[in-house]
Image: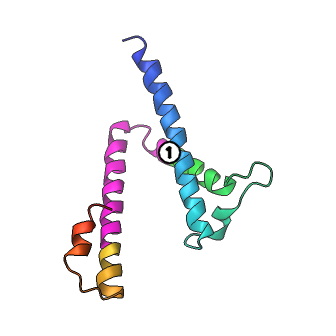
Amino acid sequence: MLAALPMSLAFGFANAMVFQAAISRLLFSMARDKKLPEFLAKVHPKHQTPYMSTIVVAILSLLIASFFAEHLGELPLSVNFGALTGFILLHLSVISHFFINQKSGDYFKHPLCLPLG
């Protein structure tokens, strides 16, 4: 029981760092593909890392953490809601791409494969 708090803090910190690195790399790749503002695609000249997207993610994380400092129990709910909203929008964009933009008539294959993607 005495080791549970330090272990949970250590794992929580390590996971938060991995998530922030993953998010900054995702923002970097989207900016590199011209889907987000170009300044997010800047690479540090010495370390060859996406430093601008990392700074943006760090600032956003600090703002969100300070907003939820008094209500830590609500943070997982908002994360779950955000993930659910993201997946719904992803599925709607796939439906829009195949059925509206490409005018695909394959009404069996695309909706069937949608949850598998």
14 over 40 or under it: above or below: above
Q: Main secondary structure of the magenta part?
A: helix
Which residue lies at the image location 35% right of the left edge and 67% below the top edge? Answer: 90
15 falls in the magenta region: no
Q: Is residue 110 left or right of residue 48?
A: left
Q: Position of residue 104 (x, y in %)?
A: 29, 85
33 over 103 or under it: above or below: above
Q: Nearer the viewer, residue 14 or 106?
A: 106
Image quadrant for the C terminus? bottom left
* Residue 115, quarter of picture: bottom left
Q: Nearer the viewer, residue 52 or 72?
A: 52
66 over 88 or under it: above or below: above
* Disc 1 target residue: 19
How was this image coloured?
Answer: rainbow
Q: Is residue 98 left or right of residue 33?
A: left
Helix, strand or loop status at disc 1: helix
Q: Position of residue 10 (x, y in %)?
A: 50, 26
Which residue lies at the image location 33% right of the left edge and 73% below the top edge? Answer: 94
* Residue 88, quarter of picture: bottom left
User: What residue occupies the far left of the structure in this picture?
Assistant: 108
Q: Is residue 26 left or right of residue 113?
A: right
Q: Nearer the viewer, residue 61 or 11?
A: 11
Image quadrant for the N terminus? top left
Q: What stretch of residues is rendered in magenta?
A: 64-92
Which residue lies at the image location 36% right of the left edge and 86% below the top edge? Answer: 101
82 falls in the magenta region: yes
Q: Position of residue 4 (x, y in %)?
A: 40, 17
Assess disc 1: are there few (<14), some (14-19) or many (≥20) residues with their C-alpha within 10 Å of its C-alpha.
Answer: few
Q: Amino acid at mark 1?
A: Phe
Q: Position of residue 22 (x, y in %)?
A: 53, 50
User: What residue occupies the far right of the structure in this picture?
Assistant: 46
